[in-house]
Image (spheres, rainbow, N blue to C red):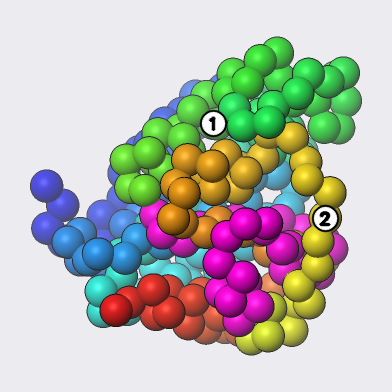
Protein backbone atom coordinates (compact mmCIF):
# COMPACT_ATOMS: atom_id res chain seq x y z
CA UNK A 1 0.00 0.00 0.00
CA UNK A 2 2.79 2.43 0.93
CA UNK A 3 5.70 1.79 -1.41
CA UNK A 4 7.59 5.04 -0.85
CA UNK A 5 10.29 5.36 1.80
CA UNK A 6 8.46 8.34 3.35
CA UNK A 7 4.71 8.58 3.80
CA UNK A 8 2.57 10.75 6.07
CA UNK A 9 -0.83 9.57 7.23
CA UNK A 10 -3.61 11.26 9.16
CA UNK A 11 -4.28 8.85 12.02
CA UNK A 12 -7.03 10.87 13.68
CA UNK A 13 -8.23 14.29 14.75
CA UNK A 14 -8.05 16.19 18.00
CA UNK A 15 -11.01 17.35 20.07
CA UNK A 16 -10.96 20.63 18.13
CA UNK A 17 -10.55 18.89 14.77
CA UNK A 18 -6.81 19.29 14.19
CA UNK A 19 -5.09 16.50 12.28
CA UNK A 20 -2.90 14.03 14.15
CA UNK A 21 -0.29 12.75 11.73
CA UNK A 22 2.17 9.88 11.63
CA UNK A 23 5.07 9.71 9.19
CA UNK A 24 6.46 6.35 8.18
CA UNK A 25 10.17 6.47 7.33
CA UNK A 26 11.77 3.46 5.67
CA UNK A 27 10.66 0.37 3.81
CA UNK A 28 7.11 -0.63 4.71
CA UNK A 29 8.23 -4.27 4.53
CA UNK A 30 10.98 -3.77 7.11
CA UNK A 31 10.47 -6.23 9.97
CA UNK A 32 11.40 -3.88 12.82
CA UNK A 33 8.93 -1.12 13.65
CA UNK A 34 9.78 1.78 15.93
CA UNK A 35 7.28 4.37 17.14
CA UNK A 36 8.58 7.76 18.33
CA UNK A 37 6.18 10.35 19.77
CA UNK A 38 7.41 13.92 20.13
CA UNK A 39 4.95 14.96 22.80
CA UNK A 40 1.73 13.95 24.52
CA UNK A 41 1.55 17.04 26.71
CA UNK A 42 1.22 20.30 24.81
CA UNK A 43 3.56 22.26 27.08
CA UNK A 44 6.41 19.72 26.71
CA UNK A 45 7.42 20.18 23.06
CA UNK A 46 11.20 19.57 23.00
CA UNK A 47 10.81 16.06 21.58
CA UNK A 48 9.33 17.43 18.38
CA UNK A 49 12.77 18.50 17.15
CA UNK A 50 14.02 14.94 17.61
CA UNK A 51 11.10 13.55 15.64
CA UNK A 52 11.66 16.12 12.91
CA UNK A 53 15.33 15.13 12.58
CA UNK A 54 14.45 11.43 12.43
CA UNK A 55 12.49 12.02 9.24
CA UNK A 56 15.82 12.26 7.39
CA UNK A 57 17.26 9.04 8.86
CA UNK A 58 17.19 5.48 7.57
CA UNK A 59 18.14 2.18 9.19
CA UNK A 60 18.15 -0.99 7.13
CA UNK A 61 15.47 -3.36 8.33
CA UNK A 62 13.61 -0.65 10.30
CA UNK A 63 10.51 1.37 9.62
CA UNK A 64 10.06 4.37 11.88
CA UNK A 65 6.61 5.69 12.73
CA UNK A 66 6.98 9.31 13.81
CA UNK A 67 4.27 11.35 15.53
CA UNK A 68 5.37 14.95 15.97
CA UNK A 69 2.61 15.72 18.47
CA UNK A 70 -0.18 13.57 19.82
CA UNK A 71 -1.87 16.63 21.32
CA UNK A 72 -2.15 19.38 18.70
CA UNK A 73 -4.79 21.30 20.65
CA UNK A 74 -2.59 21.36 23.72
CA UNK A 75 0.33 22.50 21.58
CA UNK A 76 -1.73 25.36 20.17
CA UNK A 77 -2.82 26.40 23.68
CA UNK A 78 0.52 25.51 25.34
CA UNK A 79 -1.26 23.38 27.90
CA UNK A 80 -0.50 19.95 29.30
CA UNK A 81 -4.04 18.79 28.65
CA UNK A 82 -6.08 18.52 25.47
CA UNK A 83 -8.86 20.98 24.63
CA UNK A 84 -11.25 19.13 26.97
CA UNK A 85 -8.92 19.46 29.93
CA UNK A 86 -7.81 15.82 29.90
CA UNK A 87 -4.27 14.67 30.63
CA UNK A 88 -3.89 12.22 27.75
CA UNK A 89 -1.16 10.32 29.60
CA UNK A 90 -3.70 9.32 32.23
CA UNK A 91 -6.47 8.45 29.73
CA UNK A 92 -5.26 5.15 28.23
CA UNK A 93 -7.36 2.07 29.03
CA UNK A 94 -4.82 0.14 31.07
CA UNK A 95 -4.86 0.64 34.83
CA UNK A 96 -7.07 3.68 34.23
CA UNK A 97 -8.52 5.29 37.36
CA UNK A 98 -11.06 8.02 37.93
CA UNK A 99 -9.85 11.39 39.12
CA UNK A 100 -10.93 14.93 39.79
CA UNK A 101 -10.63 17.65 37.20
CA UNK A 102 -7.29 19.42 37.37
CA UNK A 103 -3.73 18.99 36.12
CA UNK A 104 -3.88 15.20 35.85
CA UNK A 105 -7.57 14.76 35.05
CA UNK A 106 -7.84 11.29 33.40
CA UNK A 107 -11.05 12.01 31.53
CA UNK A 108 -14.61 10.80 32.09
CA UNK A 109 -13.71 7.22 31.16
CA UNK A 110 -10.79 5.17 29.90
CA UNK A 111 -9.81 5.93 26.32
CA UNK A 112 -12.40 8.69 26.04
CA UNK A 113 -10.33 11.20 24.08
CA UNK A 114 -9.96 11.30 20.29
CA UNK A 115 -6.20 11.83 20.61
CA UNK A 116 -5.92 8.70 22.77
CA UNK A 117 -7.97 6.74 20.25
CA UNK A 118 -5.74 7.91 17.38
CA UNK A 119 -2.56 6.70 19.07
CA UNK A 120 -4.20 3.43 20.09
CA UNK A 121 -5.32 2.79 16.53
CA UNK A 122 -1.81 3.42 15.21
CA UNK A 123 -0.18 1.14 17.78
CA UNK A 124 -2.67 -1.64 17.11
CA UNK A 125 -2.08 -1.42 13.36
CA UNK A 126 1.70 -1.09 13.44
CA UNK A 127 2.48 -3.15 16.59
CA UNK A 128 5.91 -1.59 17.08
CA UNK A 129 8.60 -3.60 18.82
CA UNK A 130 9.94 -0.34 20.28
CA UNK A 131 8.18 2.83 21.36
CA UNK A 132 9.80 6.01 22.68
CA UNK A 133 7.63 8.81 24.08
CA UNK A 134 9.16 12.20 24.91
CA UNK A 135 8.11 14.29 27.90
CA UNK A 136 9.71 17.07 29.96
CA UNK A 137 11.28 18.44 32.20
CA UNK A 138 12.85 15.94 34.60
CA UNK A 139 15.99 15.07 32.63
CA UNK A 140 15.82 11.28 33.04
CA UNK A 141 15.20 8.11 31.08
CA UNK A 142 12.23 6.56 32.84
CA UNK A 143 12.58 2.87 33.67
CA UNK A 144 9.68 0.85 32.27
CA UNK A 145 9.05 -2.30 34.26
CA UNK A 146 8.93 -5.77 32.78
CA UNK A 147 10.30 -4.92 29.33
CA UNK A 148 13.71 -4.81 27.62
CA UNK A 149 16.02 -3.29 30.23
CA UNK A 150 19.07 -3.27 27.96
CA UNK A 151 17.58 -0.90 25.40
CA UNK A 152 16.62 1.52 28.16
CA UNK A 153 20.07 1.38 29.71
CA UNK A 154 21.63 1.96 26.30
CA UNK A 155 19.45 4.99 25.67
CA UNK A 156 20.33 6.44 29.07
CA UNK A 157 24.05 5.88 28.53
CA UNK A 158 24.10 7.49 25.09
CA UNK A 159 22.12 10.56 26.09
CA UNK A 160 23.47 11.11 29.58
CA UNK A 161 19.95 11.07 31.02
CA UNK A 162 20.13 8.63 33.95
CA UNK A 163 17.76 5.68 34.15
CA UNK A 164 15.36 6.27 37.03
CA UNK A 165 12.06 4.85 38.23
CA UNK A 166 8.90 6.92 38.70
CA UNK A 167 5.62 5.91 40.34
CA UNK A 168 3.54 3.44 38.33
CA UNK A 169 0.99 5.97 37.10
CA UNK A 170 -2.47 4.97 35.95
CA UNK A 171 -3.63 5.16 32.34
CA UNK A 172 -0.31 5.90 30.64
CA UNK A 173 0.48 5.41 26.97
CA UNK A 174 3.49 3.18 27.62
CA UNK A 175 1.66 1.14 30.23
CA UNK A 176 -1.10 0.41 27.74
CA UNK A 177 1.33 -0.27 24.87
CA UNK A 178 3.49 -2.63 26.92
CA UNK A 179 0.38 -4.47 28.05
CA UNK A 180 -0.90 -4.77 24.47
CA UNK A 181 2.39 -5.88 22.89
CA UNK A 182 3.80 -8.48 25.24
CA UNK A 183 7.11 -8.85 23.37
CA UNK A 184 7.59 -5.12 22.77
CA UNK A 185 9.18 -2.30 24.76
CA UNK A 186 7.86 1.22 25.20
CA UNK A 187 9.43 3.75 27.54
CA UNK A 188 9.45 7.46 28.35
CA UNK A 189 12.32 9.89 28.00
CA UNK A 190 11.92 12.97 30.20
CA UNK A 191 13.95 15.66 28.45
CA UNK A 192 15.34 18.60 30.36
CA UNK A 193 13.73 22.02 30.18
CA UNK A 194 14.44 24.03 27.05
CA UNK A 195 15.82 22.65 23.82
CA UNK A 196 17.00 19.06 23.62
CA UNK A 197 20.43 18.05 22.23
CA UNK A 198 18.83 16.68 19.10
CA UNK A 199 21.76 14.82 17.57
CA UNK A 200 22.50 12.97 20.81
CA UNK A 201 18.92 11.75 21.07
CA UNK A 202 18.63 10.91 17.38
CA UNK A 203 21.78 8.80 17.65
CA UNK A 204 20.32 7.04 20.70
CA UNK A 205 17.08 6.28 18.86
CA UNK A 206 18.98 4.91 15.87
CA UNK A 207 21.16 2.73 18.11
CA UNK A 208 18.10 1.40 19.91
CA UNK A 209 16.42 0.62 16.59
CA UNK A 210 19.49 -1.21 15.29
CA UNK A 211 19.54 -3.39 18.38
CA UNK A 212 16.29 -4.97 17.16
CA UNK A 213 17.60 -5.83 13.70
CA UNK A 214 18.63 -9.49 13.41
Q: Position of residue 172 (x, y in %)?
A: 67, 40
Which residue shows up at 55% across the image and 56% down it? 186
In the picture of the structure, the residue carrying the numbered disc 1 is 115
Q: Position of residue 109 (x, y in %)?
A: 66, 15
As measured in the structure, the alpha-carbon distance from the residue carrying label 1 to the one carrying label 2 is 24 Å
Q: Residues at badges 1 and 2 in contact (C-beta under 8 Å)? A: no
- Total labels: the figure holds 2
Q: Is residue 136 magenta?
A: yes
In the picture of the structure, the residue carrying the numbered disc 2 is 166
Asked where in the image residue 128 lies, by quadrant, the reply is bottom left
Residue 135 visible here: yes
| Circle 2: element type | loop
Q: Residues within 10 Å of mark 1 (few under 14, many from 20)?
A: many
Which residue shows up at 78% across the image and 77% down it? 162
Q: Is residue 90 above or below residue 134?
A: above
Which residue shows up at 76% across the image and 77% down it? 161
Q: Is residue 67 above or below residue 18?
A: below
Q: Quadrant of the C terminus?
A: bottom left
Would you say 126 lies left or right of 27 here?
Answer: right
Residues in magenta, as a range: 128-154
Amino acid sequence: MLAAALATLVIGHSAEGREIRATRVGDEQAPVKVLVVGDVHGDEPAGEAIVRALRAKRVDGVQFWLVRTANPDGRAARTRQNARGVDLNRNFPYRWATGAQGTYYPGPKAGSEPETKALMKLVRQVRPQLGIYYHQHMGITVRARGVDAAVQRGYARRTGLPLRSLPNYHGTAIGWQNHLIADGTAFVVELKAGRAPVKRHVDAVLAAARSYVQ
